[in-house]
Amino acid sequence: MRSYKEIRNASDIPNLPEWSDELYEDWYLNFGTEVDTKEKIKERYDEVKKKLEYFYNQGRVKLFRMVVVSEMDEIIFYKIGISWTYLKEEARVYSDMPGDIYVLLIGEAPVDSIDWEHTLYMLLADPLEDEAEITLKSGSLILIKELEINGELKKLDKPIKAYA
């Protein structure tokens, strides 16, 4: 298993001390006394670090993203988006997208495709929410292996190449 130091060196994951004062100020301003110590940030960071180590050691990460369309051919695979999740139940539509076809994209990407800095920030940003977002680098390859269309799973014979 790779050490966290190796992961940080290989992936440019920011070290907590670079962020701790800024995060503390943000947390205190936004959440008041609910989260009021740097120790809480350190605890959260340690939890997040374990998740990141797990993904990095796998070499690939399974990802989920929900889109809503009126027709299946409206899905633009060459610019599918950078915000994904590693938890299926967290794949939701976060904007008012027209359409009545809900498509859960199920794919995988190499860990080198992950924007580690933004992912780390998203996983730490809200101390009251357990965030599960993985941010990919723009243009990164994602292999879509399955689609869940309005709740019905469709396994693909051949993966669809999509790009963040």
Image (cartoon, rainbow, N blue to C red):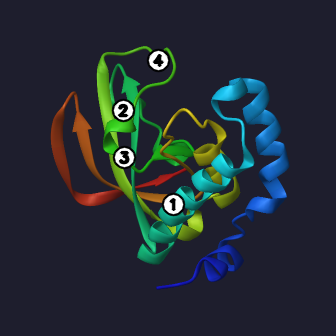
Residue named by callout 4: 97
Inter-mark Cα distance, 1 to 4: 24 Å
- The vertical placement of 52 against 71, above or below, is below
- Could you tell me if residue 141 is visible in this image? yes
Inter-mark Cα distance, 2 to 3: 26 Å
Q: Which mark is in front, 2 or 3? A: 3
Q: Amino acid at mark 4?
A: Met
Describe residue 26's horizontal placement relative to residue 89 as left or right.
right
- Could you tell me if residue 137 is visible in this image? no
- Identify which residue, 58 or 108, lies in the foreground: 58
Residue named by callout 1: 141
Residue 26 position in % (x across, y down): 78, 34
Q: Crowding at label 1, few (<14), some or many (≥20) Cα neighbours within 10 Å? A: some
- The vertical placement of 13 against 34, above or below, is below
Say whether disc 4 or disc 2 marks the residue closer to the N-terminus: 2
- The vertical placement of 59 against 40, above or below, is below
Residue named by callout 2: 73
